[in-house]
Amino acid sequence: MSLWNRAQQLPPDALRQVQNVYGEQFPIEVRHYLAGWIEDKMQQWNEIDPDNAGHSQFAHSLVSQLVQEMETKALSYSSNEDLFLVRIRLDEAANLFKTRYLNSNPLALVSIIRECLKTELHLVQQHENMLGGVAHVANMVVEPCAEIVSELEILLRRTRETADELRHLEQEQESFALQYHDCAKINAHLSHIQGQERTAQNREVEQNLRRRKEIGEQQLAQKVSGLLQRRMDLAEKHKGTIDRLNSLQQRILDEELINWKREQQMAGNGKPFNQNKLDQIQEWCEALAEIIWLNRHQIKECERHQTKIPITPPGGVDMLPTLNSHITRLLSSLVTSTFIIEKQPPQVMKTNTRFTATVRLLVGGKLNVNMTPPQVRVSIISEAQANALLKNDQMNKGEQSGEILNNAGTMEYHQGTRQLSVSFRNMQLRKIKRAEKKGTESVMDEKFSLLFQSQFSVGGGELVFQVWTLSLPVVVIVHGNQEPHAWATVSWDNAFAEQGRIPFTVPEKVPWPQIADMLDSKFKSATGRGLTDDNLKFLAGKAFRSPQVQDFNNMYLSWSQFCKEPLSERNFTFWEWFFAVMKVTREHLRQPWNDGSIMGFVGRRQAEDMLKNSISGTFLLRFSDSELGGVTIAWMYEDTTKAGDQRDVFMLQPFTSKAFAIRPLADAIADLKYLLFLYPNIPKEQAFGKYYTPMAEQQPSVNGYVKPHLITHVPGWSGAGSMDFYPNTPQPMCQMHDGGMGDPPSVSSNPSDCVST
């Protein structure tokens, strides 16, 4: 039962205390209508430290998901008039969370939610303890964890019960054997007497022996009936345990572990990922392994006892072979499914470059696999080979698509963490064998996978397991200029791969909201701040080549539009443009982007419209449409020395990574004196002053030289109608022209225009 359901069953006084915990800052309607989602994220709420600023990004992601869930829930109630007020309340709360916490202080909201849940849990536990109940809740881990832990406890209890019954069965069999032996002795004695002289004494002895034989046979018949009943009852209980084990194992492996793997894959696109959840899953799998092993041992003991006394009911079916087969299959499935890749290899893999990976066997310690440490070998296989492997569950010997150095390792057991794993720290892909390309396919479209294989035995060699697991798809490149397209292939696969797919098929077209979520995750992971609705709308217009469209939610973007077809009047694709923007922001603009000082995703015309009504000297920064990874400054300038309307918007030639390597953006903005206010009206010093490079005093160094200082300067441009150049600056190379019709005027900002003073 969920924590919220248990809270609602509290007595009136305790229930009022729970109600008092929630208020405007965290409305109780949100707790009620999103109870399942909130409790599913319970472990994540607990892992965030509200006092640790380093957890701010994780908190922002979690709060963003909460707001999205609230909006989705409210929207689902739009057609239900009875829930009109609920929808209004959820919408209000979502807006409150966005304006008060999401971008400014997400850690504060996490702290509030943690305290509310902590108080609620305390009240529930206090009440249940008073009633004598046992609350299977630890460290605020509730649904679904509590259900799994509870079911494991039930299975362990059943296993102990069947162990007790097995001991009783063994005692009954021993008693039967003694009784049978006594009967055999009576029969032997009776046969002996019958062969003697028929004296009165012998006839009396014979009569006495016959009575004892009759009583003994009656007792034996009762014991046989009792033994058969005990055996059938025990087999039925084992069958019930195996059925419950099968159901729980499916939940842990097919839901919890698969979800962890999916989250691991989405982490490749920048989604938050709780790696520590694997430790919890290992605890469940170890508990399963122990219960399965104990039950298997019990079933084998039942078979041994049955061999000793081979009695079967009339017309009965021996269930033990079937039970043994089922329990062994469960163990095999558990072992093979828990051979997993804890740390994935890089998904964009460059030849002759070192890379790492870690493989772990979740039940290795529990099954004492470490007593004979298994070897793990790594190979790289193609998409077709991966497909064949999943169909046949085996690879042809020596079949692979490349050569990997340092591709073998021995699994080690770490006592402190109770983990059996091996880390490959120095692997290197030396060669790759590629398939023939069709149509517009390129090497960056081709997906491979790393295959990890091992073999080990348990139970003193009684069971031998061949295990293997595949890494996430990887794209192999040989040069850095192939990296953007390779990341497009990987990002599309990570985001849109469906569970149980044929390797490594992905949809050709995807709804824009899913594309938007992927782009937001990647940008947030790379730069520290995600994309706004306006940013995403701009990106949609660019991707669909339709900036005039207002609503893209029902439109599908194709793989070709995403990274194959060049943008209009450009020689690069949408993804190449986005990747370059992400790269330059991550490497050179991270801090001002996170501050919101870079608008970035705005078109040239839109920037002109925004600035034309601003005061002179107002500027904004936007990502260039024409140059990959370029950042341009658009600013409004009014020439007061001339009559009439002399206002115009100018665009500085885009800065690139090369320019930022010479002069940081903030310093370049500081150099350009005619830039006064960051749009709409933030003083330049307030927005960028904290990022200026401190000016060193001009003093001779030890070797007698004075260090030069670079200044960004636009030749021929004066900020206030006069040619006020910096000292010792060369004369202008070109004169500014008044802006006329057409695109806003552009002026050069090449690094060559930087001068030393």
Image (cartoon, helix red, strand yellow):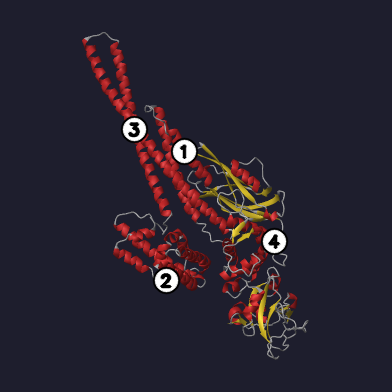
Q: Earlier in the sequence, mark 2 or mark 3?
A: 2
Q: Is residue 509 above or below residue 331?
A: below
**Camera sees residue 532:** no
Numbered disc in front, either 4 or 2: 4
- Left or right of 586? Residue 87 is left
Residue drawn at x 23%, y 16% as measured from the top left? 207
Q: Give the percent coordinates (x, y) of residue 305.
A: 39, 31
**Residue assigned mark 2:** 25
SS state under label 3:
helix
Gap between marks 4 and 2 measured at Cα: 48 Å
Viewer-nearest residue: 408 or 165: 165
The image quadrant where one finds the N terminus is: bottom left
CA–CA distance between discs 4 and 1?
54 Å
Q: Which residue is mark 4?
A: 565
Say if mark 3 contacts mark 4, CB within 8 Å: no
Mark earlier in primary sequence (4, 2): 2
Find residue 229 and name its label: 3
For the question of whether residue 299 can be seen, the reply is: yes
Circle 2 packing at 10 Å, graded few (<14), some (14-19), many (20+), is few
Q: Amino acid at mark 4?
A: Glu
Hey, what amino acid is under mark 2?
A: Gln
Cα gap from disc 2 to disc 3, whole angstroms: 63 Å
Image location (x, y in percent) of residue 71: 48, 66
Q: Amino acid at mark 3?
A: Gln
Q: SS of the residue at dot 2?
A: loop
Is tag 2's residue or tag 1's residue first in the polypeptide sequence?
A: 2
Q: Amino acid at mark 1?
A: His
From the image, tell me which residue sits under label 1: 326
Closer to the N terminus: mark 1 or mark 3?
A: 3
Q: Secondary structure at mark 1?
A: helix
* N-term-proximal mark, 4 vs 1: 1
**Mark 1 surroundings within 10 Å by alpha-carbon count, few (fewer than 14), some (14 through 19), many (20 or more):** some
